[in-house]
Image (cartoon, rainbow, N blue to C red):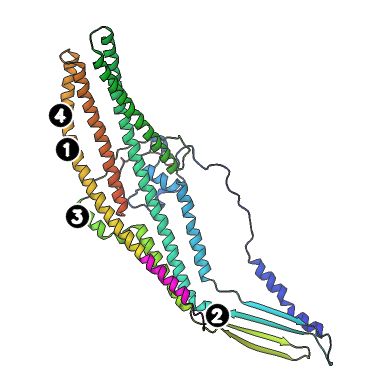
Amino acid sequence: MTRRTAWRAGRWLPAAAALALSACATYHARPLPQGPDLARSPRLTVPAKSLRIPGLQAHRFNAAHGLDMTDVVTLAVLNNPDLKAKRLQAGLARAQLLQAGLLPNPQVSASFLHPTGGPPPLANGYSLGLTQDLSALISRGAARAGAKAHKRQVNLDILWQEWQVAQQARQLFIRARSQARLLKVLRTQRKLNADNYRRDQTALQQGNLTLSAVSADLVGLVNADTQLRQVQRTDNKTWHALDALLGLKPGVKPRLRGSVSIAPLAQARFRAAVAELARRRPDLLALRAGYQSQEQAVREAILKQFPSLSVGLTQVSDTSKVHTIGFSVSLSLPLFNHNQGQIAIQRATRAALRQAYQARLDQAVNQAHELWRATRIMHRQLKTLRARLPELEQTTDAAQRSFQQGNMSAGTYINLRSSLLAKRVETIRLQASLHEAQAALETLLGMPLSPGAARHRGAAS
């Protein structure tokens, strides 16, 4: 009977252990990659309609026809390597939410006693116990609410980074297009100076021109070479940044097409956007969700100041064959520690998060006002510059005819032509700066993206 009793007492333990182990996860190694994961050509792998970029409208994509601004933004948000890594944090937040909802496992205890002496009759004894901690039930609601707010914060942080990547893609597209125009103008300027320098060198050898005049031509040619080299270096940097942003191999340099046209923001619309800034920008919404999560952390810390409570059932059989069943309660006494340390920490963290949110909101408003005024200034400057270009072009065209007819010196004509090209360079750069500022202002205000490129049709990729 002693052996049978011991067997009955422990026969369910292996079964319980097997059941618990059957639900456990198994380990599988996942080694790191050994090389880059970059594409040789632009391609779409996810429908653009799944993107959460406001104002980004879906349209057919065909890299063979060239990429407009919408294509570049879509590719960047889908294929950017940093964004791919950032999106995996959403899985971590989901796992943390799952963990917050789990209750602690019950604890099982078992013991076996074999008598080695004493008055008969003697028998083997045993004890079985089942204990459950109930204190987790008190704070479970706050923990789950905090985890849900944290998950929302992570998703909003990912969304804000997607907006940032879209903004970078627009800026790089604008720079690449403007630098292509700059290179064309500067090559024309360089050819003009080189032709003039060769012509004056021939005149110098024939004794028809002084050395000082030829030296001035050489200085002009050197300056044109310097400007051209600077833009070439900048263009190379822009293209490498664009390839990295799109997840392409270095040096791919896809063909870009489409015009850039971003409408200026009217004052009334700007003020309305600033007023709605806290309810629209993902980073501010993420900070708000993080603050809500911390509110729940404070609540959870306060709930945990109550004494921890555990209840259990025990079944015991001693060596004299006396069988008992009992009920146990374990309650901690909060004499020295009633979680006041954690409460103070969580409250201080909440205060810091509140101030961080206020600082981010103040910074966003100040940056928006500064950038909006800058766009207004650049818009007026560009309007004035464009108004002067037609007159300068007409004067230069007339000077070219006079020069070809032998009625104007080469130096005077070259100076006029150089002044026209310099104004074109200034116009291109100012227009690009204005477009970049307007695009940045839309992102800063959390507004839908303006259509920045011409519509096109093509086969879907």
Tell me: 123 left or right of 435: right
- Which of the marked residues, 3 or 4, is nearer the chain's N terminus? 3
Give the amino acid at mark 1: Thr
Q: SS at mark 4?
A: helix
Nearest the camera: 166 or 328?
328
| Mark drawn on residue 134 | 2
Nearer to us: label 1 or label 2: 1
Residue kind at label 4, given as amino acid type: Glu
Q: Which residues are magenta?
A: 336-354
Q: Is residue 452 magenta?
A: no
- In this view of the protein, can residue 202 be seen by the observer? yes
Q: List the residue tagged with mark 4.
A: 391
Image location of residue 21, percent across then percent down: 66, 67
In the rendered image, which residue does mark 3 sit on? 268
Answer with the quarter of the image where residue 9 lies. Answer: bottom right
Residue matched to label 1: 384
Per the image, label 2 sits on a secondary structure element best described as loop
